[in-house]
Image (spheres, rainbow, N blue to C red):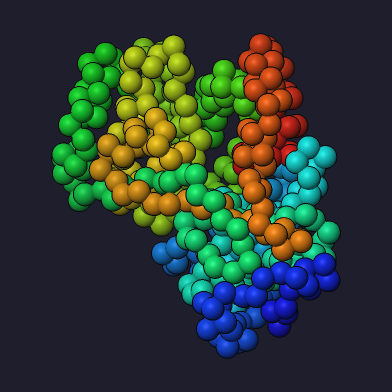
Amino acid sequence: MASMQIGCDHRANASPLPNLILKIKKEMQTMQVVEMQDRDRPVWDEYVRHSEHALPLHLSGWREVMQRTYGYPTHFLMAMEGGKVEGVLPLIQVRSWLVGKSLSSLPGGLCAESEAAAQALIHYAEELVCTRKVTRLILRDSRQDWAGNLSATRHHSAWVVTMADTVDATWNAINRKTRREIRLAQSGGVQAKVAHDQGSLEQFYRTFSAFVHQAGTPVFSRKFLRNVMDIFPEGYSICNVYKDSTIIGSFFQLELNQTIYGMWGASLPQYRDLNPTHMAYWEVMRAGLASGFRRYDMGRSPLNSGPSDFKKHWGGQEQPVYQHYFSTNGQPVESGDATERLESDPRFKTFIHVWRKLPLSITQFIGPQLRWHVPFA
């Protein structure tokens, strides 16, 4: 049985638990938090595949992805009651000279069926922060705002499209202006194709790494994507966008249950007038509908940004995305996410300027090494 106490001695002056948590304290006593073992993977994944709150990065196979790619220690936590899984929290431990020592969830944060299960997982994770001698706990990209000793920020939202039963009805639900842009792409000879094979990896990686290079951002490694494909052979797709024989955009999706999740992707800036992103989104929806999918989660975008405005015209609903933090001194963590702290540093702008001037081949070599420090920035 996992302890429900927060064990860092230097947190003696921490604020008392909110009333909401006090009300469920009795329920928490019946929760057992355990770390997933190999034998637990089937029951873990069975829970994730049946939970309405789950996202693809809650699946147990991500432990292997992160260990193979980065060698991180992992702590995949399960909250159980009466032998039944009530929540999961996949955590990785990053010890970085660049951004410090942290215990971080994968994007999606924790998945729980009740506040009691969530608080049991959070308290166990807080204990790990103390015992593992890291400075902060980060729950990334949660779709729920959890209570407790966590600080929370909300700078992003996600747009989720519930597709209609037919292609025509799905098309008609899209904003008229967006439909016009798709037609313009089609009349301009732009085509898109969704594939479920590793043969599209190099095309995606070449396009995506060129885009993030121009944006001044380090790219992750091919090895990372190969591991994702190897471990989830039925759980991904790649949409490549062409003008004649030239790839002008490429997008990587994960799939879980009846939902497609947009993860990484880009259109090359020099082809923006051809509307390749419009074409890609529509083809992902059209092909997904034909394969039995009913929702398209377009992923997170900064609030009040161009990407967020673009996504809202596809007929979806906006969902808040939260970042939750906990520090070992019990004080609120301002801008606790590595990305937020880096972007607020004036040196970050200098880095972007220099990075853009480096040859693409050099950034493809150095970028994955930097990504070891901030894998999901």
* Looking at the image, residue 214 lies above or below residue 174: above
Res 237 seen here: no
Left or right placement of residue 273 versus residue 341 in this view: left
Q: Name the residue: 40% across, 42% down.
A: 298
* Looking at the image, residue 281 lies above or below residue 235: above
Q: How many marks?
A: 0
Q: Name the residue: 20% across, 51% down.
A: 165
The percent coordinates of residue 46 (x first, y second) are 51, 68
Q: Name the residue: 72% across, 46% down.
A: 68
Depth check: give the residue in front, 362 or 115. 115
Depth check: give the residue in front, 258 or 99. 99
Quadrant of the drawing holding the N terminus: bottom right
The percent coordinates of residue 115 (x first, y second) are 51, 74
Depth check: give the residue in front, 177 or 44. 177
The percent coordinates of residue 108 (x first, y second) are 53, 54
The percent coordinates of residue 234 (x first, y second) are 48, 48
Res 306 seen here: yes
* Looking at the image, residue 38 lies above or below residue 272: below
Left or right placement of residue 373 versus residue 192 in this view: right
Q: Name the residue: 37% across, 45% down.
A: 159
Quadrant of the drawing holding the C terminus: top right
Tell me the quarter of the picture where residue 187 sits. top left
Tell me the quarter of the picture where residue 135 sits. bottom right
